[in-house]
Image (cartoon, rainbow, N blue to C red):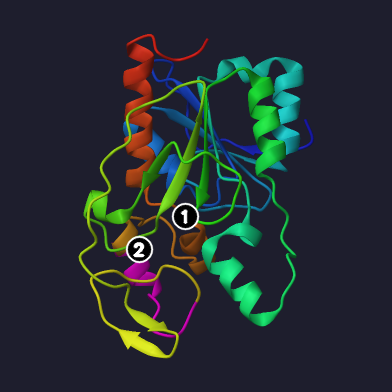
Amino acid sequence: MTHTADIRREHNAARPLLLDLYSCAGGAGRGYDRAGFTVTGVDIRPRPNYPFTFIQGDALTVLAELIASGEIRRYTAVHASPPCQDKCTLTVGTNRSRGWGGEHVDLVAPTRRLLDASGLPYVIEQPDGKADVRKDITLCGEMFGLGVMRHRNFELGGWTTAKPKHIKHRGYVRGWRHGVYRDGPYVAAYGAGGGKATVAEMQAAMGIDWTDVREELTEAIPPAYAEWLGRAFLACASAGAVAA
């Protein structure tokens, strides 16, 4: 393979293996670990804060090589958070208002094609917006008592589970929006300035304590989301409701 591996943790043979594509610093990975998986992350950038086995490389290339070699069958499931900034709600609104074009690459479709080719059950995660994903599951911070809203949509491939109830929000996200400042029980874990969260506030609001890199925090999903998904998947697998 064309990537390098940094082994941070020995595999536990009693735990199913999960491949965490576009892993960033491990928000999803930490949640799947808590759910009972042994996790391997893949990201194109060095991620020294990633807390589990880490492979630096292009996620699509790594996945294609694992499929071609047959090594993909070592894994039980795959989680993927492909970049799609050109279609998330915040970016779409900003681009439209400022006349910007879509300079980001949408990797959702090519990622899905390879995941289907892998034959493994999978999760594709995307923020709210126009990304071409099924909203099989939508999670937000209020469902887990967190200090962020951080809505995320999840497409499930090869398995399914019941949608959780979306709990009513308690108020606003703190900060300036359209010239108006509002206080609220949630912080904005993206960008900087305008009342947005500090690094310490983002860490506390999302339950992430192993990285203090702002970019990694702004890209992360709260581990509670992936833990919920991981436990739901394992329950489905135990009931024989996951595609072979």
Asked whether 85 or 203 is in front, the reply is: 85
* Residue 207 part of the magenta segment: no
Q: Can residue 91 be seen in this snapshot?
A: yes
**Foreground residue among 101 and 43:** 101
Q: Secondary structure at mark 1?
A: loop
The mark nearer the N terminus, 2 or 1, is 2
Residue 121 in the image: above or below residue 59: above
Q: Residue at x 39, y 45 (%)?
A: 138
| Dot 2 amino acid type | Gln
Residue at numbered disc 1: 220
In percent of width and height, residue 201 lies at 32, 70
How many residues crowd around disc 1 within 10 Å: few (fewer than 14), some, or many (20 or more)? many
Seen in the picture, residue 220 relative to 53 is either above or below; the reply is below
On the rendered image, what quadrant is the N terminus found in? top right
In the image, is 186 to the left or to the right of 38?
left
Residue 69 horizontal/vertical position (percent): 75, 17
Q: Is residue 230 above or below residue 168?
A: above
Q: Start and end of the magenta stretch?
A: 192-204
Q: Residue at x 39, y 58 (%)?
A: 150
Left or right of 109 in this view: 239 = left
Percent across and percent down for residue 184 are 25, 75
Residue 10 drawn at (x, y percent): 47, 28
Instruction: Classify 133 as above or below 152.
Output: above
Question: In the image, 68: left or right of 129?
Answer: right
Nearest to the observer: residue 58 or residue 163: 163
Q: Is residue 4 visible?
A: no
Residue 149 position by quadrant: bottom left
**Residue drawn at 40 percent across, 20 percent down:** 15
Q: Which mark is residue 203?
A: 2
